[in-house]
């Protein structure tokens, strides 16, 4: 019994001393993932990995939720397209996780800002801009990412949310992240998990019956728009400002992918249409005020309802390649025009 | 006879210690509501 207690204590001390941001950034992200769908463990490791690297190579970082995760064919395919168009190598980082909010995106951007040079693509959507402050309260209380971010803390303070007490020890401060994943210890025996960005392939498609009831669910996603959008756009503003302040980063806003069928359902509903139109006005005013490129490439990528598994996730590999080609083409144009401006 | 006995005790302590540590971790996780976020498809 004393021996068992001693072993448990030694393990605890090992966690306190060994589980550091450096280790999470250096080790394969798969060691901290419970399974291949464990987005937030992947994202934490991917961000910490970037913070350890050098910023000499041009980089494209896409920060977004599952709609963006499913829409990009693969990072290598994306990087290849960029190299083909611009004649220089690129690192593509898919910093995506299911349901990633703009508050978490601010934390990710804060962590990578000083370590990247290139383009940071921030996903935006009416649903994200409609998120209520109580969602942020939940994320402060139980963070999904194990990242120490001043920007995230500052956002909480600005929103009047009390921050949890910090000890300065990474393991203790992020005990929720680790205690949710005790099974990850088995990865030491069976090897690291391999993350997969195309989770929607394994999901059940929405039935016709569910589509008939979709209006209500889609409306609920944006019903808080009028109340919350101003505050949420301010978070995006501060994220852009921080990235720009770091230098060498072009920020691009990318409208999240949406199934055209879901879009039509929302436009057919008077209530949803009102919020959507308000969003469209606001995002236009926002990009003008902040002089930030905004890409809404859903129509150009010619995505059709049959290529989606639900309201916002692509399941068709060819459609994801088409979308990635359109995105790469826009980003390449933006980068080359910026380079021309700088040379001029 | 002494060495195998000591090895047995050590092995038992390691196994029990690992289980104890994981059980406490799980308990802390449950107590604080820590969970892995799963996207709920539509």
Image (spheres, helix red, strand yellow):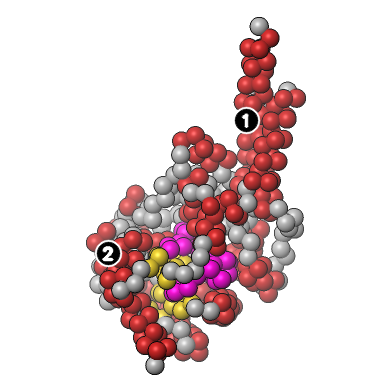
Quadrant in which the C terminus of chain A is drawn: bottom left
* Front position in the image: B15 or A255: B15
Tell me if residue A107 is in the magenta stretch.
Answer: yes
Which quadrant holds residue A215?
A: bottom left
Image position, residue A297 (x, y; %): 33, 76
How dense is the environment of label 2, judged by Cα within 10 Å: few (below 14), some, or many (20 and up)? some
The dot on residue B19 is 1
Residue A174 vertical position relative to residue A325 in the rendered view, above or below: above
Label 2 sits on residue: A321
Q: Residue placed at 37% from the left, 88% from the top?
A: A340
Marker disc for residue A290? none
Let me know if residue A217 appears in the view.
Answer: no
In percent of width and height, residue A243 lies at 54, 76
Q: Residues within 10 Å of mark 1 (few under 14, many from 20)?
A: some
Numbered range of the magenta stretch? A93-120
Secondary structure beneath dot 1 equals helix
Q: Are marks 1 and 2 on the same chain?
A: no
Q: Residue furthest top?
A: B1
Q: Is residue A65 left or right of residue A73?
A: right
């Amino acid at each position: 019994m004393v021996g068992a207690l001693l072993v448990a204590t030694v393990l605890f001390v090992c966690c306190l001393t060994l589980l550091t941001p450096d280790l999470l950034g250096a080790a394969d992200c798969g060691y901290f993932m419970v399974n291949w769908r464990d987005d937030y463990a992947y994202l934490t490791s991917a961000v910490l990995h970037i913070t350890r690297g050098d910023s000499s190579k041009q980089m494209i970082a896409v920060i977004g939720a599952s709609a963006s995760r499913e829409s990009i064919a693969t990072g290598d395919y994306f990087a290849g397209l960029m190299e083909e168009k611009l004649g220089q190598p690129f690192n593509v980082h898919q910093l995506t996780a299911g349901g990633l909010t703009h508050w978490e995106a601010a934390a990710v951007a804060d962590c990578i800002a000083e370590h990247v040079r290139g383009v940071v693509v921030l996903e935006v959507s009416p649903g994200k801009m409609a998120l209520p402050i109580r969602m942020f309260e939940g994320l402060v209380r139980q963070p999904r990412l194990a990242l120490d971010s001043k920007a995230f803390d500052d956002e909480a303070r600005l929103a009047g949310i009390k921050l949890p007490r910090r000890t300065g020890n990474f393991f203790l401060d992020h005990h929720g992240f680790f205690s949710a994943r005790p099974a990850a210890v088995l990865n030491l025996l069976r090897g690291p998990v391999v993350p997969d960005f195309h989770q929607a392939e394994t999901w059940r498609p929405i039935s016709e019956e569910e589509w008939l009831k979709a209006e209500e669910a889609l409306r609920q996603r944006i019903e808080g728009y009028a109340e919350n959008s101003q505050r949420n756009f301010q978070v995006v503003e501060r994220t852009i400002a921080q990235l720009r302040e770091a230098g060498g980063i072009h920020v691009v806003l990318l409208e999240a992918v949406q199934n055209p069928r879901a879009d039509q359902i929302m436009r057919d509903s008077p209530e949803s249409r009102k919020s959507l139109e308000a969003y469209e006005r606001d995002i236009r005013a926002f990009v003008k005020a902040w002089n930030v490129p905004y890409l809404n490439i859903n129509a150009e990528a010619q995505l059709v309802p049959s290529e989606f598994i639900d309201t916002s996730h692509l399941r068709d590999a060819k459609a994801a390649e088409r979308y990635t080609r359109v995105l790469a083409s826009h980003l390449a144009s933006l980068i080359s025009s910026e380079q021309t401006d700088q040379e001029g | 006879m002494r060495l195998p006995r000591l090895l047995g005790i050590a092995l038992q302590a390691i196994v029990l210690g690992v289980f104890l540590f994981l059980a406490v971790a799980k308990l802390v996780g449950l107590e604080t509501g820590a969970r892995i976020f799963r996207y709920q498809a539509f």
